[in-house]
Image (cartoon, rainbow, N blue to C red):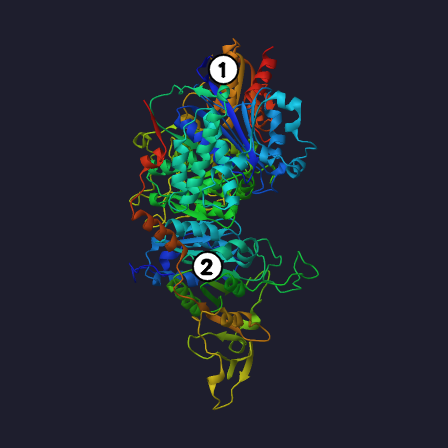
Amino acid sequence: MTQATDSFEEIESAVVRFAGDSGDGMQTIGERFTDSSAFAGNDIATLPDFPAEIRAPAGTLAGVSGYQLQFGSRSILTPGDEPDALVAMNPAALKSNISDLPEGGMLVVNVDSFKKMNLKKAGYESNPLEDEEFRKKYQLIELDLTTLTKEALSESPLKPSDKARCKNFFALGFMCYVYGRPLDPTLKFFDQKWGKRLPEVAEANSTALKAGHNLGDTMETARNRYQLAKAVVQPGVYRKISGNEALVYGLVAGAQSANRELLYSGYPITPASPVLEGLSALKKFGIKTVQAEDEIAAMGVAIGASFAGDLSVVATSGPGMCLKSEFIGLASITELPVIICNVQRGGPSTGLPTKTEQSDLLQSLFSRHGDCPLPVIAAHSPSDCFECSIEACRIALTYCTPVIYLSDLYVANGAEPWLVPNAADIPSIDAKFADPSEEYISYKRNPNTLARTQAIPGQPGLEHRIGGLEKSEDGGVNYDPENHEQMTHLRADKVERIADSLPPTQLHGEQQGDLLVIGWGGTYGAITSATQAMQAEGFSISSLHLRHLNPLPKDLGDIIKRFKKVIVPELNLGQLSLILRAKYLVDAIPLTKVQGKPFKVSELRDSFHKELS
Amino acid sequence: MSTTNTEEGSLTKKDFVTENDVRWCPGCGDYAILNAVQRTLPELGVPKEKFVVVSGIGCSSRFPYYMNTYGFHTIHGRAPTVATGVKSANPDLSVWMVTGDGDGLSIGGNHLMHLLRRNLDINVLLFNNRIYGLTKGQYSPTSEVGKKTKSTPVGSLDYPINPLLFALGSEATFIARTSDTDQKHMVETFKAAQAHKGTSFIEIFQNCVIFNNNAFDTVTGREVRSEQALMLEEGKPLRFGENKGIRLNGFDPEIVELQDGDDESDLLVHHSKTNNPAYASILAQMAYPAFPTPFGILRQIEGRETYEDALHSQIKASQSKGEGNLQELLTGQNSWVVE
């Protein structure tokens, strides 16, 4: 926070968390606040956090849904360690979130919901809002949100219960006032969502939003009003994008740049379902989507479509990956391009289905029987999902291989501003089918990439059989010991060849030093923020973030040797560190967390400090 | 299946024979089925390059290696999913799926059910030998109760599934049965399957000479078949043997013996295109020893849209309003400009 100007306080960034019952619409207002912040020209990072149950009993701790975002005029890489302001719609939301709010933080509560029954459901023996010590600890703003909303909507034709449901937008209006967010993007959202179908709902929500905003104006909360400059960014057209959206767009772009038809098959699973839904809405791009009967079938459909010449894609999460394993082995031995996306969540088994984790790395690398290495890549931020999915298309088609694309719930559901790329600048992917005028040998390899060439059904003269049995170069079934060894090596070597096509690894910081932080996936923001902060403090620390987890970049071994210590933060029990230790014989230090939550920047800094002291 | 007739008459059985040695046991019923398929395909008017044979795992599933077409030997039980992918990607292909009683009804029962209800225009050949052959002789989901095998030394416990009833319950639009002992009938049945637009399900009684030899002799054996096989003919009364027929008593079929001059009019008449599944269900449940076993097309329902047609017509309808523009998609409707 810097100097105050008039009634505004100029700040560089802020973290706001909305928390309420899962039926209270917290994700909705979180997203609206994000859109407004993006529209206001701030950089943003978000963390939606919702329970596994769609509607746990109202008012209970199990049903609390939250949405945190950080926005600012500087570069924002994480949703923030702790909120500057917390909006709690009921006692349960207060109870499960208050420990994260630092002393002096802004606390907005809906006092209408602080009734005996709700307090009891949340496990409060007395009303915390009546505790003087508690009241002094925070900048408490008590709003009768339900009453105020109903009053504002006295003219609305909606039923009283429906009027009360608009209270989330009242709260949003208030917070938009406090942080100087524009209302226009939200008003436009109402119009797009309900304008034609339910105009009275659009009207009521607009009224509630504006009433909340006006209340801020009349409440003499000017001391709490903040102002943020626009973030300084590269000029261009921007939009807000989530990781799963970026994945969908990247697949469409990848298929176009390879001139292939796209077939997606999937089975609904959290947090990957938005990929199935997103692609299903894009029929005008000629995209075929199949909702299969189970995870196994989704993989089989993709393999069949790939054999027939489509660029085929599946997306799932951990349990689905387990089920697909046998089929992934088939795609490996038949050497068919398929993109297998795993949006990771907490495991094993059903685990933490709505919380983030990075614990499927070893599964991605090793879960097939037999020697079956496959390319594995991981996206590090919502917008990076776009780049990564195009990279997955490139590898799959150039090397005629299944590719595993990893993201995680945090990356997939999180959102950030994105400099919209120029579609014409997306590089084309050269992936030709076999030429019917030439003799076809189904497993003859390109000498550079070791990829075979696909011949697709319908081409006269190229009839051939493929399958799960080991075969020789001509595609014939072959059980000879030497042949199996040779083919196993060839398949592995082909995957290893991908490393030849990778750019040099980028380091954040000096090329050598005391501590190297190696990360992958969704920890990028926290690692980069922590590293930058420590560099500013004068520490000899650098970080690098791996997109390619198999094959690893060829220069990684040399980079590692230039640092005294290597630390590997991961949201698992140390999976990448195990690989780095095995591959480079380096004493990589695992820094692990498995709480279903991303790293806090402060946690990483503390650990890095320890290694450097 | 129906595919445009483009190269009628130019293909022969030889075109569909591969150089690979066929490695089924001598005397296996699979040879006869392979022969019948290789005789059928040249007569369908479909260019050779449009055939795709997809299989799962098991003795029957080695089939693609012996067909000189595009072929895919996949994994156990999952052939329906791969076949669905092939046909969805390119509806112009003529897709033939080969499976067995274990592959199709045990490990792959789920996928087979969904293939049938989706009604993709695929021909499914289910080789039923009522045993696991490739794993050397364990009982299968179509084995009779009490089957003594290596895994069930004092007899199997579970009640068998009836493949035809399974298909009927899965909303199959074409259900037929044939036998490896009858070349002519197999070829006729395969041709009818090809002519049907939608998933065609064909159960083939197939003899496993090693682990379940003569399993169907009580029905298809030379001496008994005229008495035990009920050959279904469209529009004709259900007759078998010298002078026997089937009529309905309430919901139950019963065998009647016709004397000279008796009227056939109270016999059931075969109408495979009846929408109500009750009739096909009655046929499917007729079995040895109480009844003769029906062969032929039990049911064929026309006019139900295939999955791949529906899939592609949704895309066409959407594209008729204008094809997608990638730049517009990437930019979205809520972008802003930073100068």
Report crowding for label 1: few under 14, some 14 to 19, many 20 or more residues within 10 A (C-alpha).
few
Circle 2 or circle 1, nearest the eye: 1
Q: Is residue A586 above or below residue A417?
A: above
- Which element is circle 1 on? loop
Instruction: Give the chain of mark 2.
Output: B
Q: Residues within 10 Å of mark 2 (few under 14, many from 20)?
A: many
Count numbered badges in the picture. 2
Compared to A144, does A543 lie above or below?
Answer: above
Q: Where is residue B113 in the image (x, y as percent from the top left)?
A: 51, 57
For this view, does A504 lie left or right of residue B131?
left
Q: In this rendering, does residue B32 appear at all?
A: yes
- Quarter-wise, where is residue A354 in the image? top right
| Viewer-nearest residue: B239 or A341 | A341
Check the residue under mark 1 and report the chain it is in.
Answer: A
> Which of A52/B252 is in front?
A52
| Quarter holding residue A146 | top right
Q: Compared to B206, does A519 lie above or below?
A: above
Residue type beneath disc 1: Met
Q: Can residue A374 be seen by looking at this rendering?
A: no
Tell me where residue A345 sits by quadrant. top right
Give the labeled residue for mark 2: B124
Label of residue A1 in the image:
1
Percent x, y of residue B159: 63, 63
Does residue A73 appear left or right of residue A56 in this picture? left
Q: Where is residue B4 in the image (x, y as percent from the top left)?
A: 31, 59
Separation of marks 2 and 1 at Cα, in angstroms: 71 Å
